[in-house]
Amino acid sequence: MSRGILHLAAAAVALAVPTPAPANCFPPKSFSQIGMQVSRYVLLPSTAQATPGSVIGRYWQPGVRVSTNEGTCDEPNWLTRCYDCYVPHHGPVYYVDGLLGQMSCFSGCPVGEMIVLIQDRVPNGGGIFAAGRVDEIPGGVPRFDFSRIEKDWELVPIPPPHITLSQAQGSTLHLSMTFDDPGAGYFGLDDGFPTETITAIHLLTFEGLTPPVNRASWTPVKRFTYLGGTTTGSADILSACPGSDEAIRFVAAALELDGGEFLTDYVSAGVAVSCTAQTPAGAGRLPETGTGAMTVRRSPAGELTLDWGAACEPPSPTYEVYEGILGDWIDMVPITCFLTSPTLTFPEPAHDAYYLVVPYANRVRPPQVEGSYGLRSDGTERAPSPSACRPQWIVPCP
C-alpha cells in the first residue's frame, strides 16, 4: 500500500510547475542509493578510466538547475567509490550518498524531484553516463531515495552517430545519420520515462588528429529531439570541404538533459568523416588468427622473417612493425615505420621479443594515421606505442 501511495505522489509532482529551490538547505535533506531496506550502486565498465579527475557527478532539481546550485557541489562530497561492496561486477563500483546542507560545499536544496547524472570516459572510446531521477518523500530517510529505483545504475556509452550518407555539396558536407537509443542509461521510477530526462541528442564536430572527449572542444552542429528508440536525422557542416590537409574531421554526440538545462560534459566516441570518399579516414587491423595471421621464420643465418596477410582497411595499406621485450607490453619500439610489402627480414635479437604489425593509411593527402595494434584477450584495443610512428585512428573492419 505504501509503495502505491509513493508512486501517486511522484505522478502528482511530475505534473506540477517546478518550485524554485532555496539556495541553502535547512533542515538538511539526504539523497542516497542507501535506503532503509536495500542498497543500490553505480557500476562502471572495466574499461572506464574511473579516476577522481575523470568521473563527473552532477545533480539538480528538474527545471531549475541554476537555482539549485548544480555544479558547486562536486561529486567527492556525495559519490563514494566502494572497494569492499558485495556486488557481482568486474568494474569499478560507486554509490550515491549525500546530505544537502551538511556537505563541505554549497549544495543547494532541490525540492520535489531530483536528477543525478554520473559521467566517466573510456580511453579511446568516448563518454559514458547514467542518469537517475526520483521524487522527494517528505519526512523520508533518505528524502530522495534512489534505492526505490530497485536497480543498480550501469554507465553506458553516449551513442555515437552512425553515418548513413556523407556527401559534399560545394563547401558543405551533408550527413545523414542514426543514433542508438540512449535510454539504457536512464534509471527512474516505474511511472517515469527516459524522454522526460534525456530530451535531445546534439551533433558536434571537431577537426584535428585526436578527437577529445571533453565537449567544450567541439563545435555544435545540430540538435535532434529524443523521442525514445533510435533517432534519425541529417545535418550540414558548413565550410567543411575540401577539408584540411593537416587534420581529420570528426563528428560526435552529446546528450541534452532536462529540456536544455544541461548537456553532458563528455561526447561520444568520435566518428571520422571526409569530403572525399577516396581519402580513407583511418586504418583497420590485421588478422590475428587463421589465414593471414602473422608467422615467424628463423633462418640458419640467424635472421627472422615475418609474414602477414592483408589488413581489412584500407584496401592497400602500408605497414609499421614494432618490437617489444617479452613481459613488457607497453614500451614497444618501431623497427620500421614504412613498409609496402607484407614481409620483413631482420637480424634475430639477443633478447626474448615479440612483434606487432600495424597498418596505416597512406592517404592521398596528409595526415597519415595508423590503425589497430590488435586486441587484448578481453577484446579491448592494445594501447599504441609510446614511440608510435604516427597518430592513431582506427576504422572498423567491414
Image (tube, rainbow, N blue to C red):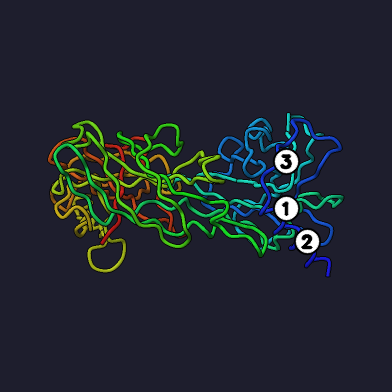
Q: Position of residue 82 (x, y in %)?
A: 71, 49
Q: On the image, numbered disc 2 is attached to which residue?
A: 6
Q: Is residue 21 above or below residue 272?
A: above
Q: Are marks 2 and 1 in contact (CB under 8 Å)?
A: yes
Q: Position of residue 311 (x, y in %)?
A: 22, 56
Judge left or right: residue 152 versus residue 54.
right
Q: CA distance from mark 3 to mark 2?
A: 18 Å
**Does label 2 or label 1 sit earlier along the sequence?**
2
Q: Regarding mark 2 in the picture, which secondary structure is present there?
A: helix
The label on residue 106 is none
Say whether residue 325 is visible: no
Q: Is residue 5 above or below residue 146?
A: below
Q: Please give the name of the residue rendered at 67% of the width and 38% of the height, measured from the top-left corner.
A: 75
Q: Please give the name of the residue rendered at 24% of the width and 36% of the height, measured from the top-left corner.
A: 238
The label on residue 135 is 1
Q: What type is the residue that disc 3 sits on?
A: Pro
Q: Position of residue 292 (x, y in %)?
A: 22, 63
In the rendered image, which quarter contains the N terminus?
bottom right
The label on residue 110 is 3
Q: What type is the residue that disc 2 sits on?
A: Leu
In the rendered image, which quarter contains the C terminus?
bottom left
Of residues 371 and 15, the one nearer the viewer is: 15
Q: Please give the name of the residue rendered at 65% of the width and 47% of the height, measured from the top-left corner.
A: 115
